Amino acid sequence: MILTNSLNKNETAVVLLNGMSEPFGPRVIAIPEQPLVYQRTASASFDLPPVPFGDDTPWFLKSLSIDIRLNAEMFQRTFNEGIFSFLFYAGSLIFFLCSLCYAIKFSLWPLANLFLAALAFRGVLAFNTFINNQEMQEIIGTFLNNVVPASFALPLFFLGFGTLVNLFSLLSFTAKRRFDDDD
């Protein structure tokens, strides 16, 4: 069985020669840019980076972590493109998330509203990750025929959809107020 530590750039591998039945038995240790080390038994004399023997993290937390990291990379990339690109992207995302406030006020139960808001935020994160994928950027670029740069497609979608949601909220508030005035 091979155990690796892929949490950092220097990937360390431990090969358990007798498998997980003997985790402290004979092993071979591979550290980048160093010769292989054979140990008959696990000893504390050899300084090893931590190697996870099992990952108990739930899947939804792993996927959330991946989406947050990919979105952070997108923010970094837009910041490196220029301040206008960064402000346009971040501003449209903030506007879109703020327009989803109707999800927070969906029911009379505060805990249900909190969970709905978390689901809405998670959905926006996942959608953002999906659209910022290189293949999707190419598809969007061919669809738009270079009318708008593909990097501006997602912020424009956020602005457009956020505007529609705010318009719907305004119209429903007006209709509800008119209905209340009629009574």
Image: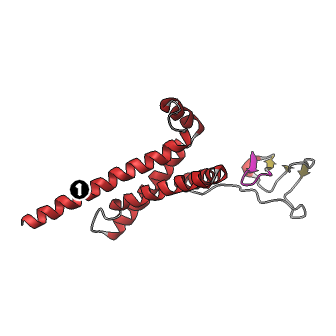
Please tell me which residue is depicted at 50% across the width and 57% down the height of the picture.
91
Res. 127 in view? no
Whether residue 31 sits left or right of residue 81 in the image: it is: right
Report the magenta stretch's main SS: loop
Q: Is residue 4 magenta?
A: yes
Secondary element under disc 1, as helix, strand or loop, is helix
| Residue 119 in the image, given as x and y percentages of width and height | 42, 56
Q: Which residue in the structure is indicated by mark 1?
A: 171
| Residue 150 in the image, given as x and y percentages of width and height | 54, 39
| Residue 176 in the image, given as x and y percentages of width and height | 17, 61
| Residue 122 in the image, given as x and y percentages of width and height | 47, 55
Vertical side of 167 occupied by 101: above or below? below
Please tell me which residue is depicted at 67% across the width and 52% down the height of the picture.
80
User: Mark 1: which amino acid?
Assistant: Leu
Q: Is residue 58 magenta?
A: no
Q: How many marks?
A: 1
Magenta part of the chain: 1-10
10 Å neighbourhood of mark 1: few (<14), some, or many (≥20)? few
- Most extreme residue toward the bottom, as rendered? 110
Please tell me which residue is depicted at 51% across the width and 29% down the height of the picture.
145
